[in-house]
Amino acid sequence: MPKVSSLLRRVDVWGTFKARWGIGRMNYKVDPGLYALGNPGEQSPVLVTANFKMSFDKLRESLPGRDAWIFVLDTKGINVWCAAGKGTFGTAELVARITLCGLTDIVSHREVILPQLAGPGVSAHQVKKLSGFKVIYGPIRAIDLPTFLDAGLKATPDMRMKTFTTWERVELIPIELVGTIKIGLPLMLIFFLVDSLWNTGDFWINALSTGVYSAMAIPAAILAGAVLTPLFLPWLPGRAFSLKGLIPGVLVTLALTVFRWNALDTWAGHLETAAWFFIILAISTFLAMNFTGASTYTSLSGVKKEMRWAVPLQIGVGILGLGLWLGSHIIS
């Protein structure tokens, strides 16, 4: 029986950091099965989790000095909440894993403690019928497990409430940035080169006057949609996330306009400024809407409803911005 400690090693902390930044995230998992935390016996609690290693580590880290069985399901390396929604953290997997691990021969009780966020994927009465084990839903946060266990498996109202604090949102920003940066860097290079090569004259003079401005606009849009919107999410107006991305988009556009105020002396400068206003808004509102997948605020039906009207608008605004950008170069 594999034994694990509640004390995370340096390699575990480094692995979590890399996963936050999308490095090896889709393969960051542990083998499914039963793990011994401390020196558990036949009366020790059985705590069920996903085989996403970050979930596994959060669980064991929250139980220093405890003896417990950690029961890991095969969720294909996906965390509890997402796996429950996808069906991999589900009734069939739980029942099958109980049989595969011979859990009835290891513990004398017939209870398994699941994270509350596993609820959408697990039918408790079916688990009881098929395996004989009673499903008990523990608290949302692993950090509350010691109190939950000491209280006789009773959860307080606070343990049932899913928070989405500033720090919890900050932890999600890196993975949001990784995907956008992969697309943003080539776009920055394209806009920089076009601006620098379009007009006659010295390349570097053109680069400093227009190329750098265009190159800065892309990370500014990413900053607005993927960083500022998640950071200030509860205080931004509107229910739709795409609308929440408007104010950060406008703010970074104004900051860029101040950076290149002298360009407003010409018609081309006015067109280019207007162009980036629309392009940045299209990008920032799209990235803000994309954050719904990491949020506790929205439902799948709500997201689909928003996308039906937001995506066409974002495409239209983006095309308008590109048209104005090309127009500013034609008349310059």
Image: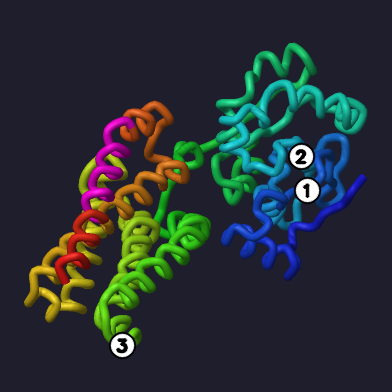
Pick whichever, 279 or 74, lies toward us: 279
Residue behind mark 1: 30
Q: Is residue 112 above or below residue 150?
A: above
Q: Amino acid at mark 3?
A: Asp
Residue drawn 73% across and 70% down? 10
Q: Amino acid at mark 2?
A: Val
The quadrant holding residue 257 is bottom left
| Residue 256 rendering spot, x and y as whole percentages | 22, 72
The disc, 2 or 1, on the residue closer to the chain's N-terminal end is 1
Residue behind mark 2: 72
Q: Is residue 10 above or below residue 54?
A: below
**Circles 2, 1 touching at the beta carbon (< 8 Å):** yes
| Residue 85 rendering spot, x and y as whole percentages | 56, 30
Location of the C terminus (image quadrant): bottom left
In terms of secondary structure, what is the magenta stretch mainly? Answer: helix
**Circles 3, 1 touching at the beta carbon (< 8 Å):** no
| Residue 136 rendering spot, x and y as whole percentages | 65, 28
Magenta stretch encompasses residue 142? no
Q: CA distance from mark 3 to mark 1?
A: 57 Å
